[in-house]
Amino acid sequence: HLLLVDDSQAILSKISSELKELGFEVHCANNPIKAYDLLDHLHIDCILSDYEMPGIKGTAFAQTLKKNERFKDTPFIIFTALDRHEILLEAVECGADDFIPKTLPTPILKAKIHFHIQSAKNIRKLQQAHWHQGIEQMITTYNHEFNNPLAIIFGYLDLLEKKKDIDPLPILTQIREQSVRIREIVKKLGQATKFKEEDYTKKTKDIKMKQK
């Protein structure tokens, strides 16, 4: 799924038609505000944005998106008819992943888009692998943390069951202490697995875009 952003309807029609012929599913927006509305409810694999648009440049649009946790890893390509080194530098500085002239031959354009989409997928796979590794380590740690106090509690319970004449108060005190320890472990576990939710439904009016 590609998102093509350009203020020229003629360019949108031409480029989107070419991209569809290459096998891509293309969504179009004639300005960054409408693009953000589409991003709000669509899954987009790569964004191609014109550089020079009324009100806001493609580089400013890229900079805004890259600050959003949801889109920071989505490939963003500046797609322009201009071919100046200063634009390339500006694109890099704003966080765009590539700078492509509109005169680029179609096969190369396809290859570049596929490259960026695959690179983003590879990054996500690595992040997921690290996440799963972290979960496994956490399970091992807390398994040990739980087993120790539980073993002590069951040991004291066995002692109470076998020796009826023993004073139960010290043992009950120990059981209570170990129960408190388990409660603290559960509390720590809850904190460790709590993930901050991002506001993925934030509207464009809440996003401050610097006009250039």
Image (tube, rainbow, N blue to C red):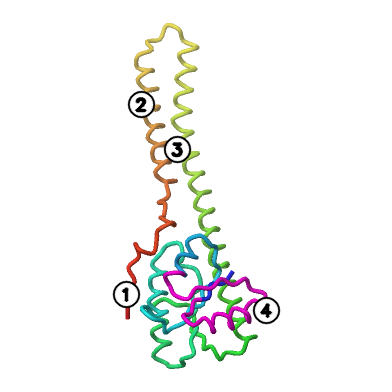
Mark 4 residue type: Glu
Sequence order check, earlier mark of 4 and 2: 4
Does the stretch in magenta take in 68? no
Q: Are marks 4 and 2 in contact (CB under 8 Å)?
A: no
Mark 2 residue type: Glu
Of residue 52 and residue 198, the one placed in the foreground of this image is 52
Sequence order check, earlier mark of 3 and 4: 4
Residue under pointer 2: 177
Residue under pointer 3: 145
Helix, strand or loop for disc 3: helix
Calculate the distance from the C-alpha at mark 3 to the C-alpha at mark 4.
58 Å
The residue depicted at 36 percent of the width and 26 percent of the height is: 177
> Which label belongs to residue 21?
4
Calculate the distance from the C-alpha at mark 4 to the C-alpha at mark 2.
69 Å
Tell me the quadrant of the picture where the N terminus can be found: bottom right
> Which label belongs to residue 210?
1
Closer to the eye: label 4 or 2: 4
Does the stretch in magenta take in 18? yes
Calculate the distance from the C-alpha at mark 1 to the C-alpha at mark 4.
35 Å
Neighbours of disc 1 within 10 Å: few (<14), some (14-19), many (20+): few
Calculate the distance from the C-alpha at mark 3 to the C-alpha at mark 2.
14 Å
Calculate the distance from the C-alpha at mark 1 to the C-alpha at mark 3.
51 Å
- Side of 135 where 52 appears, left or right: left
Q: Are marks 1 and 3 in contact (CB under 8 Å)?
A: no
Neighbours of disc 2 within 10 Å: few (<14), some (14-19), many (20+): some
Q: Is residue 175 above or below residue 113?
A: above
Neighbours of disc 3 within 10 Å: few (<14), some (14-19), many (20+): some
Calculate the distance from the C-alpha at mark 1 to the C-alpha at mark 2.
57 Å
The residue segment tinted magenta is 5-34
Residue 119 location in percent, x, y? 56, 72
Residue 93 location in percent, x, y? 38, 80
